[in-house]
Amino acid sequence: MRTALLQSSGRPGSTVENLKVLDEAAGRAAAAGAGLLLTPEMFLTGYAIGDDIGRLAEPADGDCADAIAEIATSHGLAIAYGYPERAGEAVFNSAQLISADGTRLANYRKTHLFGCFERDHFTPGEQQVVQAEIDGVRVGLLICYDVEFPENVRAHALAGTDLLVVPTAQMHPFQFVAESMIPVRAFESQMYVAYVNRVGREGEFEFVGLSTLAGPDGIARTRAGRGEDLVLADVDPAFLAASREHNPYLRDRRPGLYGSLV
């Protein structure tokens, strides 16, 4: 399954403009043969937009979800995007996966909030593993800081995730996460990991780009630079199956020894 990573901060504060950016990227991705397009964390609205997070937050089935479903169907590819989700009085930092036929397949709420900014604006989610299937590939969702906890990724591995999609807002000076940690996570839990970042300065943050799709052999299949970009790579179920057969990590686990971890 060819997968496109849209490395962009869009137009912070404007869902209208960000939907236009997404539509244009979906057209380019589909023309390149992609079946799945991924965006960064909070792509729909922007990340460092302060109290506008609450103002722009929408339910998972809101107007913007409908608009993205139309983009997905018009270009014939699935889309996973980051956005602020409103549920009653709570606002979650969420990622939603919509199929190529416009069906809402999965919605994930970030479980590990990073820093005072996120804790001031979001409620943490409580569901660790959220998955859906696209073209025979089991796709799981995490968001940014979540992937830095190996327990989260291993939970996905044990649940059968093939491609872990991680919209992120990775900032300076933590670029080692994209450069080093993501390939290691893919190798140690035997899956593909797609890590899709924002770029440039936004409020007090400087986002570092370096969006990456790493394979179960720990090798990056594609890596963006520091600017706006659309990069593509293939997720190969046959290669993944062969890698899992030869790599013993998951088979050699001894869960009985790990009780002290919790």
Image: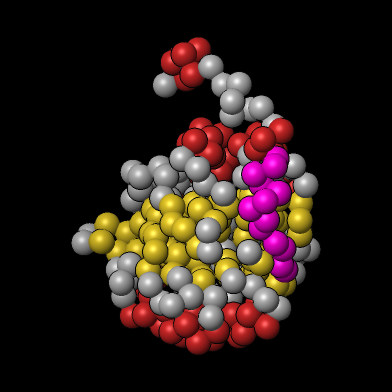
Q: In front here: 68 or 3? A: 3
- Kindly indicate the quadrant of the structure image that contains residue 213: bottom right
Judge whether residue 205 is colored magenta.
no
Judge whether residue 240 is colored magenta.
yes
Asked if 186 appears above or below 2 in the picture, the reply is above
Q: In front here: 171 or 239? A: 239
Q: Which residues are magenta?
A: 231-243
- Residue 93 seen by the camera: no
At a point 42% along the width and 21% down the height, the residue shown is: 262
Q: Residue 214, percent across and down?
A: 70, 50
At a point 51% along the width and 71% down the height, the residue shown is: 78
Asked if 189 appears above or below 30 in the picture, the reply is above
- Kindly indicate the quadrant of the structure image that contains residue 20: bottom right
Q: Residue 18, percent across and down?
A: 52, 80
At a point 49% along the width and 19% down the height, the residue shown is: 255
Left or right of 4: which side holds 65?
left
At a point 53% along the width and 39% down the height, the residue shown is: 157
Asked if 219 appears above or below 45 in the picture, the reply is above
Left or right of 214: which side holds 137?
left
